[in-house]
Amino acid sequence: MSPVAVIVVVLVYIALLFAIAWLAGRHADNAAFFTGNRRSSWLVAAFSMITAAMSGVTYLSVPGSVATDSFSYMQMVLGFTVGQLIVAFVLVPLFYRMRVISLYQYLDRRFGVTSQRTGAWFFFLSKMLGAALRVYIVCAVMQLLVFDRFGLPFAVNAVVTMLFVWLYTRRGGVKSLIWTDSFKTLCLVASLVLTILALVRGLGLTTGEALSEVASSDYARIFFFDDPSSERYFWKMFVAGIVLLVAMTGLDQDMMQRNLSCRSPRDAQKNILLTALCQIVVILLFLTLGALLYLYAAHVGMELPPKSDQLFSQVAVNGGLPLHVGLLFVLGMMASTYSSAGSALTALTTSFTVDLLDATRHGDEARLTQTRRRVHALMAVGMTLLVLLFGHFGNDSVINLFFKVAGYTYGPILGMFLFGICTRRRIDDRWLPLVAVAAPLLSALLQYVAQEMFGYRIGFELLVYNAAITMAGMWLLGRERKNA
């Protein structure tokens, strides 16, 4: 695939993205940046959330995972659906009632400012590492497709990518993000559907025959009840899906910022329920695509890549399919990457400005605007430096370590919110940072001991143990509220 063709697709995509961002964010103020003035259409918000929940990692890895995990990911998606109900009917009414800008303002009002800042710092670490890793993975693909062919270093790739993300999010924030992410959703779903149709034609089958072929293959197995120690065991994935969704959507400033931009709690709930249904369909498309990629590779005698997350790019670019398939791959990858990076940058700016700098208490709109813009630029620079750091190492073990750290840090956030919602105890929150740091470390130790001593592999459900340890620590710091 010609790098010139890739560049043309990317530039057209970015031009459209900037046009939408400019139109949506022309008259945006601080309230528009942080909450979209709470006037977002629930239907548009739901459409935008489809891509927001994805990333370049999802786009590359979920299709490739089908060979080893079949369709078992759908077990977790069922858990996601239950988690969406908890977010819609427990968290949304709570956050709307408190009129929070940042979710972690709840922790301040429930326990104290130290709790708010602890939650915000853990979110900052989680989101900054996770977003930078996702951008790095896609930059690595673009380096092979374009930048290496022109002799340009990885640093240029990373800086250009993050510069575009910073530019299109700097003015409108959530107000423009809702519309730009809707456009990205359209691009992502179109690329998935059209790529699937191209693979069906490449296999020489009709759509019905291809779906029948997928359904009758080993790839299509969804439910795994046979081995409780396996990471694919149904109940482990189902429960983990519930907890992950609540922690990484309901308690994540990035994701909830869109929900809280709707006009009312009822609109936000409709948005979340529609998102849950759409998520099921989109994940099924990803998994079906994965099965078809493997069937197509076998059909044409293509050697499988050493890493499963390279399968999609290899088939799309070098699989003998029409040129437009490779360009669709690039389009979908760009849509997923810019969505996750742009929303993360907006959420990091909001949380840092509101929770850590406490800039909204002064009531000075001009001063708040100046602070917010400086923080937004600082977050973009920080994310760029992390992407460059990952590019310098280029080592899977180092990158996986950072990704695990980002995952561990959601446990204390979940534990803090659950303790606040489910108990009536006050705590001496001066010691909460110590509890929040200890919980992930003890969780990692528990995971190691379970594997080494009992042969039991703790998978996604590690988040549950992490949150439980946090809650136990908070209980030791607390006492029953007498005036509640």
Image (cartoon, grey):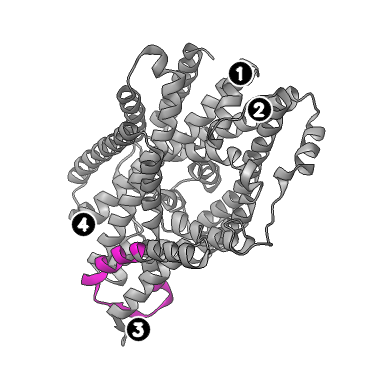
Looking at numbered disc 2 in the image, what kind of residue is underneath it?
A: Leu
Element carrying mark 1: helix
Residue furthest toward the front? Answer: 453
User: Residue 431 lies in magenta, yes or no?
Assistant: yes
- Disc 1 to disc 2, C-alpha distance: 9 Å
User: Residue 337 lies in magenta, yes or no?
Assistant: no
| Residue 391 x/y as whole percent | 34, 32
Looking at numbered disc 1 in the image, what kind of residue is underneath it?
A: His
Element carrying mark 2: helix
Q: Observer-nearest residue: 251 or 224?
A: 224
Mark 2 and mark 1 in contact (Cβ < 8 Å)? yes
Report crowding for label 4: few under 14, some 14 to 19, many 20 or more residues within 10 A (C-alpha).
Answer: few
Mark positioned earlier in the residue sequence (4 or 3): 4
| Drawn side of residue 378 relative to residue 347, left or right | left
Looking at numbered disc 3 in the image, what kind of residue is underneath it?
A: Ala
> Is residue 130 in view?
yes
Q: Quadrant of the N terminus?
A: top right
Q: Observer-nearest residue: 169 or 262?
A: 169
- Disc 3 to disc 2, C-alpha distance: 57 Å
Residue annotated with mark 1:
324
Residue annotated with mark 4:
361
Mark positioned earlier in the residue sequence (3 or 2): 2
Q: Nearer the viewer, mark 1 or mark 3?
A: 1
Looking at the image, is 357 positioned above or below residue 179?
below
> Is residue 91 in view?
no
- Disc 2 to disc 4, C-alpha distance: 49 Å
Mark positioned earlier in the residue sequence (4 or 1): 1
Mark positioned earlier in the residue sequence (1 or 3): 1
Residue annotated with mark 3:
484
Q: Nearer the viewer, mark 4 or mark 3?
A: 3
Residue annotated with mark 2:
194
Mark positioned earlier in the residue sequence (1 or 2): 2
